Amino acid sequence: MSTTDVQSSGASGIASVGNSDMKVEVIVIPVADVDRAKEFYRSLGWRLDVTPPSVVQFTPPGSDCSIQFGTNLTSAAPGSAKGYLVVADIVAARDALVSAGVEVDEIYHPGKDGPVSGLDPERRSYFSRASFSDSDGNSWVLQEITTRLPGRIDAAASSFGSASDLAGALRRAEAAHGEHEKRTGEADPNWPDWYAAYMAAEQAGTELPT
């Protein structure tokens, strides 16, 4: 087989794999005390899923990916895992965790010289964050995202993980549509279509309607 044939075969293999859906289903996290970890994640309001014996699985609200822990599921040291939890409103999400008895760090955003206390001044997606740890020290970072970077979401497919995420998107569309009507100087009878276009574009990270 020639070098060209090998290169062609390799490229073809990559292309075929890229055409196959591979959805992240479960992430295994290391814990020292399964029962203690179970109570912690139950206190967050995460869904406890049906699993085989010796495996505990929880799914965060609105998430397509779950976490698992149990006896002998991983050789990683308890507390060594780190994950990100995407939220549409970091203030509301942090308040809910604190109300559930979880110790959550103050909200911060990246600055040129390191983390800066408080929300991102422009409330940009990906910038506002807050952190907390589970009962074993595994860390979770709340990250506020309302508009995805281009290419992160299929522009032809929009979905919302929860009623609160949908409500937040509707409120942002309402505010933007108000500015749209101010610019045009007239009421827009087709506002449902405008809302839909705005919400889909915001989620996909494509150009927003004006």
Image (cartoon, rainbow, N blue to C red):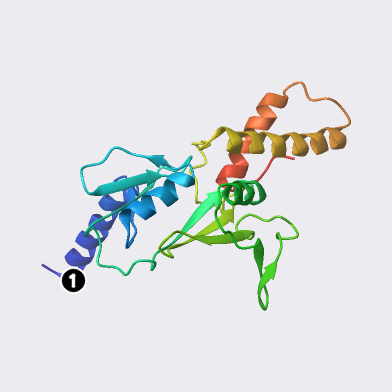
- Let me know if residue 65 appears in the view: yes
The kind of secondary structure element at disc 1 is: helix
Please count the marks in the image: 1
Q: Is residue 112 left or right of residue 43?
A: right
- Report the residue at 49% width, 36% height from top: 157
Q: Nearer the viewer, residue 120 or 91?
A: 91
Does residue 146 lie above or below 106 as drawn? above
- Report the residue at 35% width, 49% height from top: 24
- Let me know if residue 198 appears in the view: no
Residue pointed to by mark 1:
3
Where residue 56 appears, x then y in whole percent?
30, 47
- Report the residue at 43% width, 45% height from top: 42
Position of the C terminus, as image quadrant, is top right
Amino acid marked by disc 1? Thr
Q: Residue furthest left?
A: 1
Where residue 126 appears, x then y in whole percent?
60, 58
- Report the residue at 14% width, 69% height from top: 2
Where residue 199 appears, x then y in whole percent?
63, 37
Q: Nearer the viewer, residue 197 or 148?
A: 148
Where residue 186 appears, x then y in whole percent?
86, 27
Q: Is residue 75 left or right of residue 143?
A: left
Q: Residue furthest right?
A: 185
